[in-house]
């Protein structure tokens, strides 16, 4: 079952910056990028809960980070 979604409002200048980052990054949209960043931040907040990723997920993250210029 898919979870329902909500709308979050952010300042338009911030959204434009995110759009620029997303171009050629491997993310499909600014929303995908924002969800990725928020999940990452929330993951840091969850202490003592190990997260395991599949090799496919790891490869996907590495590809996205490389496209962003981090790797």
Image (cartoon, helix red, strand yellow):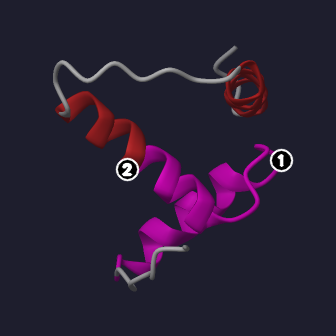
Q: Residue 9, position in %: x, y?
A: 34, 83
Tell me what residue is drawn at x 42 percent, y 23 percent.
51
The residue furthest right is 24
Please tell me which of labels 2 and 1 falls first in the chain: 1
Question: Where 22 falls versus 14 (above or below)?
Answer: above
Q: Position of residue 38 (x, y in %)?
A: 37, 50
Of residues 3 and 17, the one nearer the viewer is 3
Question: Which of pointers 2 and 1 indicates the residue nearer the eye?
Answer: 2
Q: Which mark is residue 24?
A: 1
Which quadrant does the C terminus fall into? top right
Which of the 4 image quarters holds residue 45? top left
**Residue at point 20%, 32% (across, down):** 46
The residue most toward the front is: 1
Which residue in the protein does label 2 denote?
38
Nearer to us in this view, 50 or 35? 50
Q: In the rendered view, tell whether residue 31 sits above or below residue 65.
A: below
User: What segment carries the magenta color?
Assistant: 9-38
Q: Is residue 41 above or below residue 48?
A: below
> Which secondary structure type mostly characterizes the magenta part of the structure?
helix
Residue 49: mark in rendering: none
Please, what secondary structure does the residue beneath circle 2 have? helix
Q: Is residue 32 in the magenta section?
A: yes
């Amino acid at each position: 079952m898919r979870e329902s979604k909500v709308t979050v409002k952010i300042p338009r200048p911030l959204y434009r910056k995110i759009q620029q980052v997303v171009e050629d990054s491997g993310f499909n949209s600014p929303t995908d990028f924002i969800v990725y960043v928020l999940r990452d931040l929330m993951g840091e907040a969850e202490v003592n809960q190990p997260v395991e990723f599949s090799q496919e997920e790891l490869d996907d993250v590495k590809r996205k980070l490389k496209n962003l210029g981090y790797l």
